[in-house]
Image: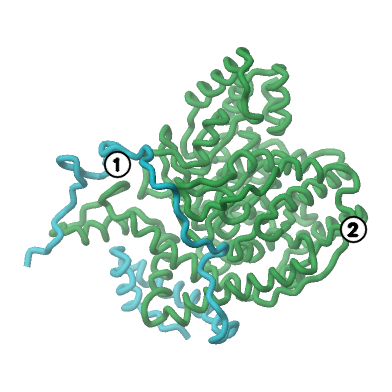
Amino acid sequence: MSQDLTRKTASELAQLLATKEVSAVEVTKAHLDRIASVGDSVHSFLHHNNESALATAKQVDELRAAGEPLAELAGVPIAVKDNLTTTDAPTTAGSKMLEGWLPPYDATVVAKLRKAMLPILGKTNLDEFAMGSSTEFSAFGPSRNPWDLERIPGGSGGGSSSVVASFQAPLAIGSDTGGSIRFPAAVTGTVGIKPTYGAVSRYGLIALASSLDQIGPVTRNVLDAALLQDLIAGHDPHDSTSLPESLGSMADAARAGLQPGSLKGIKVGIIKQLTGAGFQAGVTTRFEESLKLMVEAGAELVEVDCPSFEYAIDAYYLILPAEASSNLAKFDSVRFGARTMPEGNPTIERVMAATREAGFGPEVKRRIILGTYALSSGSYDKFYGAALKVRTLIQRDFDAAFAKADVLVSPTAPTTAFKFGDKVADPLAMYLNDVATIPANLAGIPGISVPIGLAPEDNLPVGIQFLAPARQDAKLYHVGAALEGILENLWGKRMIDFANELKGI
Amino acid sequence: MSDITPELVRHLASLARIDLKEDEVIRFTEQLALIVDSVAKISNAIDASTPSTSHPIAMSNVYRDDVVEPSLSQEQALSGAPDQAQGRFKVNAILDEE
């Protein structure tokens, strides 16, 4: 029974809990058992919250027995990326700088999870301050891809992707600045969504680049992601970029997408710049197969041209470091985090410089220095100023593309999961992983990655990305659920069921 | 070619208050030169008439009602500080000896 419960989707668990076929304590214990057996091999968690998770589960069972009204996902366990503040668990953002830091407040998303009574199993690993695509830049060691433990689980949110892919939790929270939810989803055969900028409050998210960051769901299927976005979305006066209006029910959109004929008449725009050369052969094979299936189901394909996307990575690697260099100035050895004493006379500036030298890892230092350069008086116009203009061009490309299509489509990532060490010493090669995901962050629009099978050459997961206009996240859930349903019919099983049992466990 | 030199990297690191070790200066000089050369092509994409976008979804004058809400106590605000005294953050000397 315990084994079965970890294989269920969140919506199935919610159903079993609502009908009292299982208790929330049983569901949480099943996942804690799973964590105990595979946790060390996958290394998804930086901190476990067993006691408080079980206490929440017990409370759910008591309230249900008393006939109290409960949230749909009450009692369904979840894992939270370790760059969201939690008052009952250390929050490190994967950095030595914050090792052991216990925040004095909960992130708004965490407060919503607590209010809906989802047992929080623990905090998941990430590249330091979410800077990276592999978790190799976590100060506490990388997480592993459950499909092949010698490969990366994607990043920065490789802890959250590997948690759901290895059945340690049905749900997880991620954050996406340039692809940190969608890239890990693609390489682990799971679902990840970056909602519209401002759809989910970022209060309590340790900021990387404030004009790009967005919190979103990490799950094994589209409906679960929709239920989770419905739970965490909404206006928050604590976040001045939070959208005041509701974007509607994502769960309704996903359920509509699962109905037969739901793709009829939907115009899908293939982004010319994000296909073909530069994409692994097996990625293209699966991508084209999915497009064909969508056409057979009534969708209409059009090609769209987004010429400015050629410059998206360049603009991103100026805007992000510029904003990060400013956001990370708060780590100054005074108010929270580490303090390292230098040799000699310890003035505050020397303490600060010694602390930041000792507390930050290589990728964080590299990006802070790059950002400082991009913002310095001699290079501001040529670099940061130019990047802001490219951002306008990318938004215009999207506007033109969405005039021709309801949603846009591309592979989520150029390759399947690569091996540890393959790209860690070559920043430019690492940055290319996000070529297809970055434009959405620059424009503030929503994007989803849905698994579409295995690349024939390496039997590793491939993801497809759909993009929609700002505030139209519901379209992604509709189309994503539709394609997922078609593929599951074709396979006779779920994508994650292709995964082998974890080796050596 | 970029203008990234070890001297510039040392200067940028001192502006960013990071006391880089010499081997890091050498490595970052090489890596940043490659990155800067690569991103410099963005100037080909734009001209003087292209407007800037700093935020993806622009909002202005975001206010909330001017009412007191629960906030951190002094004790909570100091709870993560490396050092404190008399209810305040304690820091090292601001001025150098000379």
Side of A440 where A500 appears, left or right: right
Task: Name the chain under label 2.
Answer: A
Residue A27 position, x and y percent, is 63, 23
Side of A89 where A458 appears, left or right: right
From the image, tell me which residue sits under label 1: B77
Residue A500 position, x and y percent, is 73, 39
The colour one sees for chain A in the rendered image is green
Task: Tell me the amino acid under the disc marked 2.
Answer: Val
Mark seen at residue A295: 2
Side of B68 where A282 appears, left or right: right
Residue A499 shows up from this direction: no
Residue A184 shows up from this direction: yes
Task: Tell me the amino acid under the disc marked 1.
Answer: Ala
The colour one sees for chain B in the rendered image is cyan
- Report how far apart the C-alphas of labels 1 and 2 lie in the structure: 57 Å
Instruction: Please state which of residues A397 and A48 is positioned toward the viewer in this rendering.
Output: A397
| Residue A107 in the image: above or below residue A129 | above
Task: Name the chain under label 1.
Answer: B
Mark 1 is surrounded, within 10 Å at the Cα level, by few (under 14), some (14 to 19) or many (20 or more) other residues, namely some
Disc 1 element: helix
Residue A330 position, x and y percent, is 34, 55
| Residue A5 in the image: above or below residue A289 | above
Does the CB distance between marks 1 and 2 fall below 8 Å? no
Please state, as top left, top right, bottom left or bottom right, where the N terminus of chain A lies in the image: top right
Instruction: Please state which of residues A119 and A186 is positioned toward the viewer in this rendering.
Output: A119
